[in-house]
């Protein structure tokens, strides 16, 4: 079972339009050395098509290094570009590894991808509803501005009229 409540949280990334997990994270979940996972991918290349399992470009790898502050190759860091796996290939990797832990965790990984997909779908519905509310508020805002402009003259104090003076006026001549 997973060590923490959700060991995959934050490990699913969006790269090249796919939601993927890095080989090192997948190997950690499957409790196998990353080297062994990559070895099985190379040996079973026909089971891992390029649109579901691919190497990161140098630029993508450098971007991930800067995001996660990983060490450089001179200090024991990654020397080769990492593989990334979609949920389908994460399941396939468990099949080629053939360990009980990998099989159990593959189900866990697929469920995490499904949960993320549901969360994204929920967020889309919420954002759509917020857009509708925003549109309604803008319409009300416009109506309130028109109403305020019409009320302004009524709220202003009445103009002061000149008063007629009572008594003897020298101006009347």
Image (cartoon, rainbow, N blue to C red):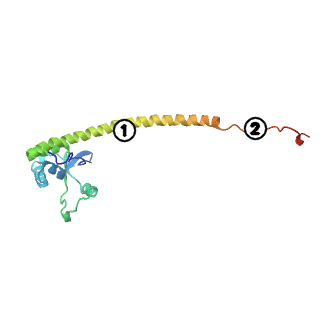
Foreground disc of the pair 1, 2: 2
Q: Quadrant of residue 59?
A: bottom left
In percent of width and height, residue 99 lies at 8, 46
Which one is nearer the viewer's eye here, 67 or 62? 67
Question: Do callouts 1 and 2 mark residues in contact (Cβ within 8 Å)?
Answer: no
In percent of width and height, residue 112 lies at 21, 42
Locate residue 117 relative to residue 163 in the image: left or right: left
> The residue tagged with tag 2: helix, strand or loop?
loop
In percent of width and height, residue 35 lies at 12, 55
In percent of width and height, residue 56 lies at 22, 53
The quadrant of the image that shows the N terminus is: top left
> The residue tagged with tag 1: helix, strand or loop?
helix
Most extreme residue toward the front is 167
Which one is nearer the viewer's eye here, 28 or 19? 28
Most extreme residue toward the bottom is 74
Which residue has dot 1 on it?
127
Identify which residue is drawn at 79% across, 38% down: 163
Q: Quadrant of residue 78?
A: bottom left
The quadrant of the image that shows the C terminus is: top right
Identify which residue is drawn at 61% across, 35% down: 151
Residue count near mark 2 (Cα–Cα under 10 Å), binned few <14, some 14–19, many ≥20: few
Q: Is residue 79 above or below residue 94?
A: below
Identify which residue is drawn at 73% across, 39% down: 160
Locate residue 33 relative to residue 152 in the image: left or right: left
Which residue has dot 2 on it?
161
């Amino acid at each position: 079972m997973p060590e923490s409540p959700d060991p995959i949280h934050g490990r699913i990334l969006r790269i090249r339009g796919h939601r993927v997990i890095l080989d090192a994270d997948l190997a950690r979940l499957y409790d196998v050395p990353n080297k062994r996972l990559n070895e099985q991918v190379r040996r079973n290349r026909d089971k891992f098509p390029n649109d579901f399992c691919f190497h990161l470009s140098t630029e993508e790898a450098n971007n991930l290094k800067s995001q996660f502050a990983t060490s450089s190759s001179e200090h024991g860091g990654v020397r080769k570009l990492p593989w990334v796996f979609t949920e389908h290939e994460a399941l396939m990797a468990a099949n080629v590894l053939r360990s009980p832990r990998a099989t159990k965790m593959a189900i866990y990984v697929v469920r995490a991808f499904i949960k993320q997909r549901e969360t994204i779908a929920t967020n889309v519905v919420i954002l759509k509803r917020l857009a509708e509310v925003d549109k309604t508020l803008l319409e009300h805002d416009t109506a309130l501005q028109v109403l305020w402009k019409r009320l302004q003259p009524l709220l202003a104090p009445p103009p002061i009229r000149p008063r007629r003076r009572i008594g003897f006026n020298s101006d009347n001549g």
